[in-house]
Image: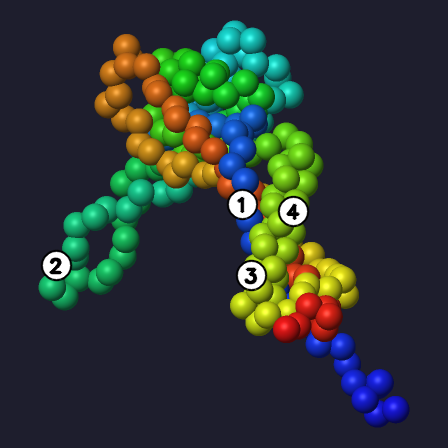
Amino acid sequence: LAADCEPRPFIRVSGEASVEVEPDQAMVRIGVESEAATARDAQLETNRIANAILVTVEELGIAPEALRTSQLRLLPVYESSQPQRGEPRRPRVVAYRATNTVSVRLGDLSRIGPVVDAAIEAGANRIEGLDLGLEDDTEARRRALVAAVEDAHSKAETIADALGVGLGPILEVGDQGIHVPRLAIQEQAMRGMAADTSTPVATGTIGVSASVMIRFGIDQAGED
């Protein structure tokens, strides 16, 4: 009777897989930075250029709802020289720096370069970053999960063969998670870029990964 109560032997494996998919959504963050002797002048100049960027991008056919201001900053610029020996350390404000970042959401990735070029032509002097992702990741998740299960089953079969036993029924399955990253291209200073230089953008692919845990019973009849 005690032997009948013994737990069934099993093989537990994890399966991992990743599928590569092309992104179909982009968020471009375009920035302008201005410096002036007064806070008001710095902000006014930044606002002027930011508005010009918005108008220029809309003229490319980008819908207004795809545009938004994602960051505003106004900071003092302090004197960089060090005080003389014995002088008190009192930082002196010598100017003000204002920044404005406009985010542009694009469903057509071929328009990233033209949008960046148009923004630079309108006065943008920074590209704060570019995020690439998927509008609908359902199919990519499904493919990654199927591949992870296949990987787990292959591992279990290999282990069973090495042990000289048969692979029994599935006793337990656990989803260990699916990861859908966003590709992020970090900010790049655009000062000094020639106006007639086209901006190339290689979007690459996104690796959607999945992991599962499966517990298989051991088929005792399969033993030698």
Residue at image mark 4:
145
First of labels 3, 2 by sequence position: 2
For marks 4 and 2, give the CA distance: 66 Å
The spot of residue 85 in percent (x, y) is 11, 64
Q: Amino acid at mark 4?
A: Leu
Which picture quadrant has residue 13? bottom right
Q: Is residue 20 left or right of residue 199?
A: right
Q: Which mark is residue 84?
A: 2
* Image quadrant occupied by the N terminus: bottom right
Classify 208 as above or below 67: below
Asked which secondary structure carries label 2, the reply is loop
Dots 4, 3 in contact, CB < 8 A: no
Residue at image mark 1:
18
Residue drawn 54% across the image and 40% down it: 19
Classify 129 as above or below 15: above
Q: Which mark is residue 158?
A: 3
Which picture quadrant has residue 107? top right
First of labels 2, 1 by sequence position: 1
Q: Amino acid at mark 2?
A: Gln
